[in-house]
Amino acid sequence: MRMRTRLLIALAVSLLPAVVATGQTASGPLAPALRTHLQNERFDIITSIRGLPLGVRDRLMPMFGGTLDIAEPGADFQKAGVAVNRQLPSRRMIAAGCSNDFHCLVYYERGGGTSTWHVLLFRWTPDATQFEWGGAAPGGFKTIEDVRKALLSGAIKTHTGPW
């Protein structure tokens, strides 16, 4: 019995970071101070998933079910209304950008039964990355500046997942 208890404790301790990371993806309204801060930020364009800071990619994985399940901009993915190809990612990055003030915005489409669009905001530093906010967005944005303006205008609504 003692060995079984130790095994269960070890399993719980090893899974705790994933549970905590996944649990932190709930998103409330964009805080007024953060909205004001984002008004003055300039986001440099990120053109590839690999262009995102490693900490942001690491935070996306638990939000996406444990893998970095997202295609590059313009690449094939599991589009809505198309026969499902399980070998393709279920999401595709459309636009992303990071600021000199350590914020990153990621705008992507999620395929499947119906397409949905999402925006994720992260605060990253070389030491730590945290999810700050996420929302359901309209489709059709082309640039990260379009996304930032929509976020500030309230066109992107708070969303709690699935991401």
Image: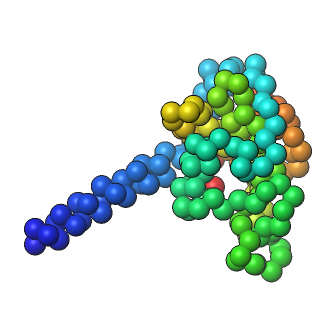
Image quarter hosting the N terminus: bottom left
Residue 152, given in percent of the width and then of the height, sits at 76, 29
| In-front residue for pair 70/28 | 70
Asked whether, in this view, residue 94 is left or right of residue 55, the answer is right
Q: Quadrant of residue 100?
A: top right
Q: Residue 130: in sight, yes or no?
A: yes
In the rendered image of this protein, does residue 53 appear above or below residue 91? above
In the rendered image of this protein, does residue 112 appear above or below residue 13? below
Asked whether, in this view, residue 122 is left or right of residue 43, the answer is left
Q: Residue 29: in sight, yes or no?
A: no
Residue 149, given in percent of the width and then of the height, sits at 82, 31
Count the labels in the image: 0
Q: Quadrant of residue 68?
A: bottom right
Residue 3, given in percent of the width and then of the height, sits at 14, 70
In the rendered image of this protein, does residue 122 appear above or below residue 138? above
**Residue at x 22%, y 67% (from the top left corner):** 7
**Residue at x 34%, y 57% (from the top left corner):** 14
